[in-house]
Image (cartoon, coloured by chain):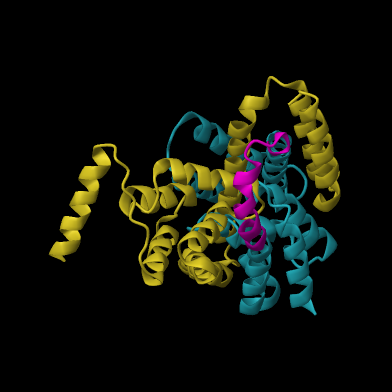
Chain colours: A cyan, B yellow
Amino acid sequence: MILIELGTYFARLSLLTFGGLSAVVPDMQRYIVDVKGWTSATDFMRLFAVAQAAPGPNVLITSLIGYRVAGVAGSLVALFALCVPPAALTWVVSALWERFRDSPWRGAIQRALAPLVVGLTFAAGYVIATPHAPDWRLWLIALATAAVMLRTRVNPLWLLAGGAVLGGLLI
Amino acid sequence: MTAIGENDSVRAVNWERGTPITTPPRSLAELFLGFLSIGARSFGGVLPAAHYVMVERRHWLTPADFTETIGLCQALPGPNVGNAAIVLGKRWFGLSGAIVAFLGLFALPYLWVLALALVYTHWAARPLVSAVVTGVGASAAGLLVATAVKLGRPMARKPAGVALMAGCFVAVAIGRMPLPVVMPIALSVGIALSRGGLL
């Protein structure tokens, strides 16, 4: 049953979403496209684009994938599967967090997670911009966006709009 | 209306004098509406919207309390502001508060993203539409790269950090290894390096 598969996968993945959703985007693409073949890599990229153009927490990409795979029920199952396990964990840990304020392990884990999250976020950018063989047009748009984002304080929505224009012209 | 307006101006004065008087939500309805407006304002980023609504506008939290709460939520898996909804809803109203805050945050963005998906599916067959959406996708990938660069700058001087970062990238992006395999290994290595003073 596809809803159960979807729910189990996202629930398991949810506990790895350190630093937000970006870190698990490559694995989502691997599972949805390579393992299950529920959609193509290009379609995955476009769903990611739609999710970015919407307001709200970027975990909503999961409800788009769920919707593509199994309709409205799929969208709710995917979203809740991704959100409820971390929420339960947060519920429990928020009571303990203060107690471990000075524990050396807390600092060690936070310092260890930082390079992981950075490496995985780079990986997310790479797999989204490279749905098949490397395409200079997609890389050009991605790198131009990254450069502007790093040099200015413009709202990211304007950068996505720029990507839309470049996409219309180049692709 | 007048009473509310006066109340707001009193809050604002106290705020500017630097005495952080907070007024946590008094009802579940107020909590729901607050998180609903965070969701509605979150075009281009949820965190700034959460700060605006909870700290600047409604004075639910002091800036320091906000930073501390987000810090906890960033250290845990899950959507940061989604986790903050759980922590704060629980603090103010227990389990029902956590659920109400969480649903308030997601309600409008969920409907919006679903509506966008329907529109996109309807028009997807047109070449121009698919080219434009592909361009947005490439641009969104660029935003991820920029975020990674920003987050990665502080560790650029630490060779062990750079190596761990590169290892994760290669394993996941090029090697296509499953994250449930990569994450525990990388985290163990990271903790060992960190305990050894290398991170």
Magenta stretch holds residue A91? yes
Q: Residue at x 20, y 57 (%)?
A: B7
Q: Quadrant of the N terminus of chain A?
A: bottom right
Place of residue A124 in the rendered image (x, y in percent of width and height, measured from the top left): 69, 46
Residue B13 on the magenta span: no
In-image side of B164 versus B58 (left or right) = right
Q: Looking at the picture, how far across and down is residue A131, in whole percent?
A: 73, 50
Q: Residue at x 59, y 59 (%)?
A: B130
Q: Would residue A160 be visible to someone looking at this image?
A: yes
Please determine whether, in this image, residue A2 is positioned above or below residue A21.
below
Quarter-of-image position of residue A71: bottom right
Left or right: where B178 falls relative to A44:
right
Along the viewing direction, whichever of A59 and B140 lies nearer the viewer: A59
Q: Nearer the viewer, residue A82 or B169?
A: A82
Residue A116 position, x and y percent, is: 73, 39
- Residue drawn at (77%, 53%) of the image: A27
Magenta-highlighted residues: A87-106
Q: Residue furthest front?
A: A99
Residue at 43 percent of width and 52 percent of height: B50
Count every numbered label the image shows and give the total: 0
Q: Is residue A19 visible?
A: no
